[in-house]
Amino acid sequence: MAYRGHVRNGVVELDEPASLPEGAEVSVDLVAAKKVLTASGGETHRGNGGSLYDRLSHVIGRIDDLPSDFSRNHDHYLYGTPKK
């Protein structure tokens, strides 16, 4: 079972109450804060890297010289397969 929590004053506090037996051995994996670009071009820190939009917003709309049928025939342009 996995539990999520935060460190406060040097102690791990679980987000949800849990009945763990006294002396139970536990493992703690750190979810590191990552610096990600936001849609406005600024930076923010999010533990999970932010939404897919936040993580990729800096490249959305940057390429403007693709063929008009690129979305339908991307395999042709990337790998040389026959056009659809």
Image (cartoon, rainbow, N blue to C red):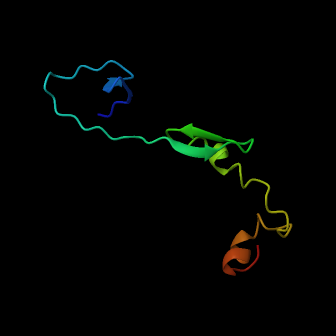
Vertical comparison of 59 with 25: above or below: below
- Residue 75 or 54: which is nearer the viewer? 54
Image quadrant of residue 24?
top left
Q: Position of residue 5 (x, y in %)?
A: 38, 28
In-image side of 9 versus 81 (left or right): left
In-image side of 23 versus 31 (left or right): left
Q: Position of residue 20 (x, y in %)?
A: 21, 23
Q: Position of residue 69 (x, y in %)?
A: 83, 67
- Residue 56 or 6: which is nearer the viewer? 6
Q: Residue at x 29, y 37 (%)?
A: 28
| Figure quadrant of the C terminus | bottom right
Q: Residue at x 25, y 38 (%)?
A: 27
Q: Position of residue 44 (x, y in %)?
A: 61, 39
In-image side of 34 versus 37 (left or right): left
Q: Residue at x 68, y 42 (%)?
A: 38
| Figure quadrant of the N terminus | top left
Residue furthest front as drawn: 9
Vertical comparison of 13 with 45: above or below: above
Image quadrant of residue 2?
top left
